[in-house]
Image (cartoon, rainbow, N blue to C red):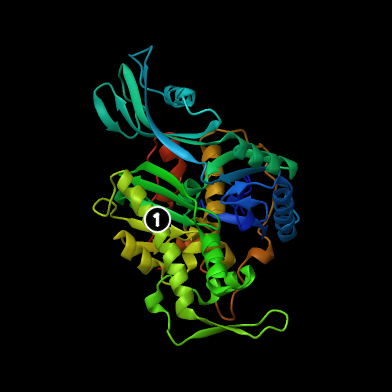
């Protein structure tokens, strides 16, 4: 166990669930999960905190579960994901003229250029969440990914600025603080999910990350190693559940259970002679529901969500000719049967499911490698990027905390866990330790030192 690293905690405040995951990198640069808790979310609608008291209760319940999984944990600061249809993005351009043109360009000058963009005019009531540099220009040399070490008179860059509603941000911060925690940073959820499921090859090929949650579907589009577009689509899993509830005349809990157990995103794949029997309410006769009808309802809403994705891709001029990496589906809603086929049919792009297990150490429980927790794992990776680039202050004394037995995968009889030391060759380690300095450093500091990742083992 590597106790020379901080324990970083991600808090995903979702519409249907709240998840808390505490992680620490081991000597191989992989995350060992030291604590995990979740709870049902009641005070959040479409990614926005509307009922602060209910949200506080849910955060506390998730925290208690996290402490129950590992009583040695002491959680004070968290990285928090933010989504909701109030999120907007805009493109800007910034330049600075250098004072000492004889010297090489330094990180301090890049930081100043980024900081200047925080003065960009945005509508009243909005607040800047993040400023992400895309590509730099030094004098007349365009498309420079990392200008540090160059010489020149003027540095410029294109920026992707993410903004959100001040009150929505205040509600999140208030809920976190009243739960006894401090917000270390707010991170846009699609960017957190992207860092958890995306590799260097995806970044170069061009991909769209589609994170289908409970209340929102989050989109992040990357092309030529650059974040080109982000968007939050206000439809997701809960809308499908409500459609089933209304369309089939069942309770919301029954609608959710049917969606998970029998749902399909393609009506053609559903058996026309299969029926689900729903018990009647208070002595009413039982109800027979066609699996085909259920699939028709799901397909209609999922097609609408994918139409929005296609619309956003066309908005930024990245249709199916440009995104060679296709679409990576993640989030809880990505586990719907036949969703890959529907996505490919509607968008014309290849699709796959993105799992966050690339960055997890071997031997964790399978629950943690589900797409549902991509955002939470990504938040921890964001924290590590801040730590490695000394962007934020972290405690200097790191406590010894071990991975609890409850979060370790129990080996079947006769099964042997391959030691990570043997599984990862020295050469691979060199490239990986260059590591996800990470995905985040690529946008924050313009540093391209992402490591190569293997193909997703699940596919």
Residue 6: % across, % down: 62, 44
- Give me the residue at 55% from left, 47% from top: 379
Identify the image quadrant of the N terminus: bottom right
Q: Nearer the viewer, residue 89 or 446?
A: 89
Query: Which quadrant of the figure has residue 344?
Result: bottom left
In the figure, 25 relative to 228: above or below?
below
> Quick one: which residue is furthest to the bottom in this view?
273
Label 1: how many Cα within 10 Å (few below 14, some 14–19, many 20+): some
Drawn side of residue 317 relative to residue 52, left or right: left
Q: Residue at x 47, y 69 (%)?
A: 336
From what the image shows, is residue 305 above or below residue 119? Answer: below
- In the displayed structure, would residue 407 be above or below residue 390? below
Compare residues 389 and 380 and report the one nearer the observer.
Answer: 380
Splitting the image into 4 quarters, where does residue 267 fall? bottom left
Residue sticking out furthest to the front: 284
* Nearer-the-camera pick, 145 or 20: 20
Residue 372 as seen in the image, left or right of residue 445:
right
Q: Which residue is mark 1?
A: 453
- Residue nearest the viewer, comparing 429 with 98: 98
């Amino acid at each position: 166990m590597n106790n020379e690293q901080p324990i970083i905690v991600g808090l995903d405040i979702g519409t249907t669930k709240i998840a808390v995951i505490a992680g620490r990198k081991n000597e191989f640069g992989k995350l060992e999960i030291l604590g995990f808790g979740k709870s049902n979310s009641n005070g959040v609608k479409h990614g926005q905190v509307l009922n602060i008291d209910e949200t506080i209760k849910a955060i506390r319940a998730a925290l208690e579960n996290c402490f129950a999984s590992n009583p040695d944990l002491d959680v004070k600061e968290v990285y928090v994901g933010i989504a909701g249809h109030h999120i907007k993005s805009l493109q800007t351009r910034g330049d600075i003229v250098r004072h000492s043109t004889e010297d090489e360009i330094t990180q301090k000058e890049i930081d100043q250029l980024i900081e200047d963009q925080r003065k960009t005019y945005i509508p009243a009531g909005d607040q800047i969440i993040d400023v992400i540099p895309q590509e730099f220009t030094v004098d007349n040399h365009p498309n420079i990914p990392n200008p540090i070490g160059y010489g020149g008179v003027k540095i410029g860059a294109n920026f992707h600025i993410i903004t959100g509603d001040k009150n929505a941000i205040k509600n999140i911060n208030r809920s976190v603080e009243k739960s006894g925690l401090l917000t270390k940073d707010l991170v846009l959820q699609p960017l957190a999910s992207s860092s958890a499921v995306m590799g260097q090859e995806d970044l170069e090929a061009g991909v769209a990350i589609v994170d289908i949650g409970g209340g929102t579907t989050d989109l992040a589009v990357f092309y030529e190693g650059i974040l080109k577009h982000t968007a939050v689509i206000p439809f997701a899993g809960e809308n499908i559940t409500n459609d089933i509830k209304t369309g089939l005349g069942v309770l919301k809990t029954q609608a959710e259970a049917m969606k998970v157990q029998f749902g399909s995103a393609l009506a053609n794949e559903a058996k026309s002679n299969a029926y689900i029997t729903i018990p009647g309410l208070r002595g009413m006769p039982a109800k027979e529901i066609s699996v085909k009808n259920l699939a028709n309802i799901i397909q209609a809403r999922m097609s609408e969500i994918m139409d929005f994705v296609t619309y956003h891709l066309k908005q930024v001029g990245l249709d199916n000719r440009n995104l060679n990496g296709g679409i990576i589906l993640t989030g809880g809603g990505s586990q719907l049967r036949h969703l890959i086929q529907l996505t490919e049919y509607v968008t014309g792009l290849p699709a796959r499911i993105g799992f966050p297990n690339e960055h997890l150490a071997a031997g964790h429980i399978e629950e943690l490698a589900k797409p549902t927790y991509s955002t939470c794992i990504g938040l921890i990776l964001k924290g590590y990027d801040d730590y490695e680039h000394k962007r934020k202050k972290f405690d200097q004394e790191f406590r010894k905390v071990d991975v609890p037995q409850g979060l370790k995968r129990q080996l079947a009889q006769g099964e042997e866990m391959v030691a990570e030391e043997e599984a990862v060759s020295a050469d691979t380690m060199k490239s990986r330790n260059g590591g996800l300095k990470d995905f985040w450093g690529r946008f924050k500091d313009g540093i391209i030192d992402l490591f190569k990742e293997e193909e997703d083992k699940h596919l």
